[in-house]
């Protein structure tokens, strides 16, 4: 794996979330090819938090697991609900 840091890692995490949603931080670690340990999962979770703050992804907790997906998908869900209500 090429050393990713800062904004480059943030862009890569966002790209992986867009390709493989819904996904856990540990799943992102696996896709990046880095070891799945507490330290690396915490680093990826930090990027989840940054992306959520910048309104690029949505997150939720299922039990103790954090799951993220792109905001576009939420928009599609709302559009689907709207169309379904028209029937």
Image (cartoon, grey):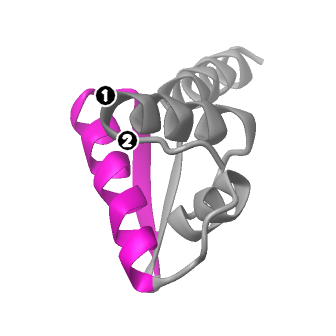
Which label is found at residue 5?
Answer: 2
Q: Residue at x 78, y 18 (%)?
A: 87
Q: How many marks?
A: 2
Relative image position of residue 11 (x, y in whole percent): 47, 28
Relative image position of residue 62 (x, y in whole percent): 49, 76
Taking the image as shown, residue 4 lies to the left or right of residue 73, namely left
Q: Can you name the residue that lies furthest to the front here?
A: 2
Q: Secondary structure at mark 2?
A: loop
Q: Which residue is mark 1?
A: 55
Name the dominant secondary structure of the magenta segment: helix
Q: Report the Cα–Cα distance between label 2 and label 1.
A: 21 Å
Front residue of 63 and 54: 54
Q: Neighbour class for label 2 at 10 Å: few (<14), some, many (≥20)?
A: few
Image position of 33 with respect to 2: above or below: below
Q: Neighbour class for label 1 at 10 Å: few (<14), some, many (≥20)?
A: few
Image position of 68 with respect to 6: above or below: below
Q: Is residue 49 magenta?
A: yes
Relative image position of residue 19 (x, y in whole percent): 73, 35
Front residue of 58 and 1: 1
Q: Secondary structure at mark 1?
A: loop
Front residue of 63 and 29: 29
Q: Residue at x 60, y 41 (%)?
A: 17
Q: Can you name the residue that lies furthest to the left here?
A: 53
Q: Residue at x 41, y 36 (%)?
A: 10
Front residue of 52 and 44: 44
Range shown magenta = 38-62
* Location of residue 30 (image quadrant): bottom right
Taking the image as shown, residue 78 lies to the left or right of residue 49, namely right
Relative image position of residue 27 (x, y in whole percent): 65, 64
């Amino acid at each position: 794996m090429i050393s990713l840091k800062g904004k480059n890692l943030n862009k890569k995490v966002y790209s992986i979330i867009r390709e493989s949603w819904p996904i856990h931080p540990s799943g992102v670690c696996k896709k990046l090819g880095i070891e799945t340990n507490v330290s690396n999962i915490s680093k990826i979770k930090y990027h989840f938090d940054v992306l959520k703050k910048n309104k690029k992804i949505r997150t939720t907790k299922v039990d103790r697991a954090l799951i993220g997906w792109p905001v576009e998908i939420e928009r599609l869900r709302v559009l689907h609900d709207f169309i379904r209500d028209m029937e």
